[in-house]
Image: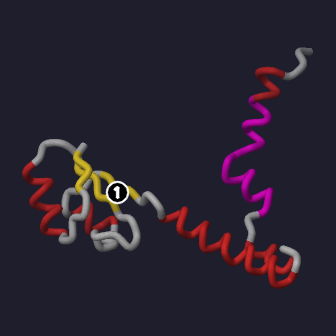
Amino acid sequence: MIFAEAVTRLEDYREFTRQVSVPVLANLTEFGQTPLFSLPELREAGVAMTLYPLSAFRAMAAAAERVYRAIRESGSQADILSSMQTRERLYEIIDYHRYERKLDELFGPKS
């Protein structure tokens, strides 16, 4: 794989992927040199993989700022609960109950 850093034009990706015989990775970090090309654009240019190294982190950091600002202003997180992920949603996303069943199957009491 080639980690093509700071590529600014789709045509440059097209040429890059024509010239090498290994997959090319696009690094789409916000506020970097590479424009935020879409996946279809990158696929058309021959890019095999796309990395979003800080997207979720930047969103989480902005959310953390909002949470702590609200706590400072009101003295509680009660007013912002609706913007938070619930425990049930987290368990659904990570399939936690399947994990618990597997642990019970492997290590639970034997009948």
Residue 71 x %, y %: 81, 76
Outermost residue, front direction?
72
Coloring scheme used: secondary structure
Q: Looking at the image, which is closer to me, 31 or 111?
A: 31
Q: Is residue 92 above or below residue 61?
A: above
Which quarter of the image is occupied by the N terminus? top left
Which quarter of the image is occupied by the C terminus? top right
Residue 55 x %, y %: 48, 65
Q: Looking at the image, which is closer to me, 27 or 99?
A: 27
Residue positioned 53% across, 68% down in the render: 58
Residue positioned 40% across, 70% down in the render: 30
Q: Is residue 1 above or below residue 90?
A: above
Residue 7 x %, y %: 21, 65
**Amino acid on which disc 1 is placed:** Thr
Residue 29 x %, y %: 38, 65
Q: Is residue 99 left or right of residue 8?
A: right
Q: Secondary structure at mark 1?
A: strand
> Is residue 101 within the magenta segment?
yes
Outermost residue, bottom direction?
73
User: How many labels were placed on the picture?
Assistant: 1
Q: Is residue 48 above or below residue 40?
A: above
Q: Is residue 25 left or right of residue 97?
A: left
Residue positioned 80% across, 57% down in the render: 87
Outermost residue, top direction?
111
Where does label 1 land, which residue? 50
The quarter of the displayed image where residue 69 is located: bottom right
Q: Looking at the image, which is closer to me, 29 or 88?
A: 29
Estimate how packed mark 1 is, as few (under 14), some (14 to 19) or many (20 or more) residues with alpha carbons within 10 Å: some
Start-end of magenta stretch:
86-102
Q: Main secondary structure of the magenta part?
A: helix
Q: Is residue 73 left or right of residue 99?
A: right
